[in-house]
Amino acid sequence: MGIRCATDIIRGCKHGVVLSGAGISTPSGIPDFRSPDTGLWSKFDPMEVASLAAFRYDPQKFYQGLRGLTELVFTARPNAAHLALARLEQAGYIHTVITQNVDLLHQRAGSKNVLEVHGSFQTLTCVWCFTQVSSESYINPYLEQGLVPTCPRCGHYLKPDLVLFGEQLPSKTWLQALNASKNCDLMIVAGSSLEVLPVAGLPMRALENGAHLILINYSQTYLDVRADVVFHEDVDHILPYLVDHLLEN
């Protein structure tokens, strides 16, 4: 019944938006952050390995702590949920993917219009002269030899363009995400527990403007009572099933 209702809603909408969280990437081998036993923050203190203060105090130690996550990101492959969302976009049902993830898996799956509100590993920026470079040529030396990236212009340390604790969201991307949420007629939340502000407030912006809401997340969220359809199941199972049903019927 839920699948039929969800597909009817998607078919009737013209401007769909997806908000994805860590739960969509865990099937690809990338752990989430807050799960009690398996989340990254159960193993590491985020203020030591994921804060702007930690980077500024000791960039070498910061990069040492980030190495394991970086390797996971660059070796991970899109799973069935990422591929399903790319199919939805190609079919014209989804116009924007807003993601809290930094793993580039939506792009690797084929999604074109992706807003990375927490940044990504795609680029690095010098903290001294603000030169921005692609991370491509720095990744292998870093992962294989532990070489910390330095600026080709001034020699100071390069910071990955991730949003660390103590940093604001990238303003341009955030405004685009806010605008997409306000103007959509459907939002699909995929793999997010909606606990991290301000991104967790985006579905409310959509609802306030009359949009439909479909929630796919293993655990409950604060908006379950407001959603049209809720699936408390694995996102890499439900999303492909939903998209197959939508596109093949």
Image (cartoon, rainbow, N blue to C red):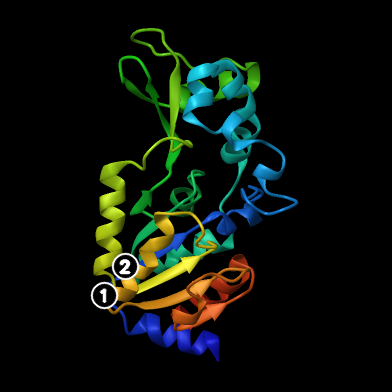
**Residue at image location 36% in from the left, 69% down from the top:** 204
Q: Amino acid under label 1?
A: Asn
Instruction: Give the quarter of the image for residue 240.
Output: bottom right
Q: What is the residue that sits farthest to the right in this orientation?
A: 37
Q: Amino acid under label 2?
A: Arg
- Would you call the spot at circle 1 few (<14 residues within 10 Å), some (14-19), or many (20 or more)? few
Is residue 185 visible in the rendered structure shown here? Answer: no
Mark 2: which secondary structure? helix
**Residue at image location 60% in from the left, 37% down from the top:** 46
Is residue 158 visible in the rendered structure shown here? Answer: yes
Q: Is residue 60 above or below residue 42?
A: above
Front one among 27 and 23:
23
Q: What is the residue that sits farthest to the bottom in this orientation?
A: 1
Q: Position of residue 21 (x, y in %)?
A: 51, 57
Q: Is residue 141 above or below residue 195?
A: above
- Would you call the spot at circle 2 few (<14 residues within 10 Å), some (14-19), or many (20 or more)? some
Q: Position of residue 188 (x, y in %)?
A: 43, 70
Q: Position of residue 127 (x, y in %)?
A: 38, 19
**Residue at image location 40% in from the left, 13% down from the top:** 151
Mark 1: which secondary structure? loop
Q: Position of residue 192 (x, y in %)?
A: 53, 61
In the rendered view of the protein, which quadrant contains the N terminus?
Answer: bottom right
The numbered mark at residue 205 is 2
**Residue at image location 55% in from the left, 16% down from the top:** 58
The numbered mark at residue 209 is 1
Q: Is residue 218 above or below residue 121?
A: below
Q: CA distance from mark 1 to mark 2?
A: 7 Å
Q: Is residue 16 above or below residue 166?
A: below
Instruction: Give the quarter of the image for residue 158.
Output: top left
Front one among 237 and 216:
216
Instruction: Find out whether the residues at labels 1 and 2 contact each other: C-beta distance under 8 Å.
Output: yes
Left or right of 183: which side holds 137?
right
